[in-house]
Image (cartoon, rainbow, N blue to C red):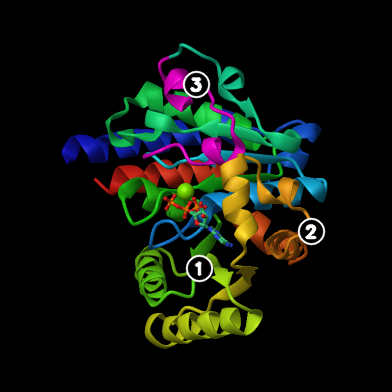
């Protein structure tokens, strides 16, 4: 424990290093406020990965650059949905076998995809040099993208919590199923115990109609306001749509395979909403470097 605290202290010192405090050149200044959004859920299989990749594509359509970090430490998710299996992951960067550039997979329509793989496992055991190396690499990613979307695995574990703690914005995905809603509430409780200022947007996936979506949101929001004193933002609803399964089988994201479908229209609306809110507020809290710092500090603290 003492070693960990010591390590955390040293980590903070590394973070303070000139590299992170330097004023970047003008080009980098434009990108330095990459919006970092962690997509999470309580229950598994509610549609995080499909929503993440298609949201990324919808943001691309609006002209933004998008990087997706697949932080699911279990099975590769996004990879399968887009039918591209990256050969390398962040683990190869950590072991210095590959450069960051070499592990970026070009996804559809110019989306950049990075697989965390085992590179995000055992973060607490990294040495000071390894931590600095990881930060340097992840920061350089943030400088080159407008949106960094992080797809996490289901449930609450240290890695997921650290990504939640570090990102300025959270998209919490739930379906209308009561089990999914109660699990989403459990995640909210966890988030609020660490950070009361977090921007949490709820995406209700697989709704029959928008009334059902609104009903689910109101239930969750009422409980959150009453018991956690945490108001939620409604990001939007996505229809339960057969084209999702079809597109997964095709390994082509639905926004590409079925662009006119209800679910595609839904995700485009959500992308539009996400980019037309008060950008200042979100950008301020989710500058990428801030994100990396918070992530590592939170992760180390959790041990
Ligand atoms: N809007 C939708 N309409 C119909 N089916 C859907 C919808 N969204 C997701 N699904 C179904 O749910 C499955 C799981 O979706 P997805 O892999 O995106 O979930 P996940 O939350 O990322 O899962 P995990 O927790 O395992 O990572 C899809 O393969 C698809 O069959
Ligand atoms: Mg997934």
The reply to whether residue 18 is visible in this rendering is: no
Q: CA distance from mark 3 to mark 1?
A: 36 Å
Q: Residue furthest top?
A: 97
Q: Which residues are magenta?
A: 74-95
Quadrant in the rendering for residue 281: bottom right
Secondary structure beneath disc 1?
loop
Which residue matches tag 2? 260
Sequence-first tag of 1 and 2: 1
**Residue depicted at 39% across the width and 77% down the height:** 178
Which residue matches tag 1? 197
Quadrant in the rendering for residue 272: bottom right
Left or right of 134? Residue 74 is left
As drawn, 296 above or below 186: above
Q: Nearer the viewer, residue 74 or 159?
A: 74
The reply to whether residue 70 is visible in this rendering is: yes
Q: Residues within 10 Å of mark 2 (few under 14, many from 20)?
A: few
For the N terminus, the quadrant is top left
Q: Are marks 3 and 2 in contact (CB under 8 Å)?
A: no
Which residue matches tag 3? 88
Secondary structure beneath disc 2?
loop
Sequence-first tag of 3 and 2: 3
């Amino acid at each position: 424990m003492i070693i960990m605290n010591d390590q955390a202290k040293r980590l903070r010192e590394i973070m303070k290093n000139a590299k992170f405090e330097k004023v970047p050149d003008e080009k980098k200044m434009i990108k330095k406020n990459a919006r970092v959004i962690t997509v999470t859920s309580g229950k598994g299989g509610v549609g995080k990965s499909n929503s993440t990749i298609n949201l990324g594509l919808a943001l691309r359509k609006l002209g933004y650059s998008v990087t997706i970090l697949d932080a699911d430490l279990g099975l590769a998710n996004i990879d399968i949905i887009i039918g591209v299996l990256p050969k390398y992951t962040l683990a190869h960067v950590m072991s210095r076998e590959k450069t960051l550039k070499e592990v970026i997979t070009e996804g559809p329509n110019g989306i950049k995809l990075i697989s965390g793989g085992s590179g995000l496992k055992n973060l607490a055991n990294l040495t000071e040099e390894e931590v600095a190396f990881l930060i340097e690499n992840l920061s350089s990613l943030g400088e080159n993208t407008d949106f960094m979307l992080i797809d996490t695995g289901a449930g609450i574990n240290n890695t997921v919590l650290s990504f939640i703690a570090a990102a300025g914005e959270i998209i919490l995905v739930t379906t209308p199923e009561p089990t999914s809603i109660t699990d989403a509430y459990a995640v909210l409780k966890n988030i609020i115990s660490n950070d009361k200022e977090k921007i949490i947007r709820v995406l209700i996936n697989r709704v029959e109609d928008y009334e059902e979506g609104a009903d689910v949101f109101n239930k969750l929001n009422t409980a959150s306001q009453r018991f956690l004193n945490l108001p939620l933002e409604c990001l939007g609803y996505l229809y339960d749509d057969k084209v999702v399964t079809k597109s997964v089988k095709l390994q082509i994201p639905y926004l590409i395979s079925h662009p006119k479908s209800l679910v595609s229209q839904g995700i485009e609306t959500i992308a539009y909403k996400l980019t037309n809110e008060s950008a200042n507020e979100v950008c301020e809290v989710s500058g990428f470097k801030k994100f990396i710092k918070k992530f590592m500090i939170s992760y180390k603290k959790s041990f």
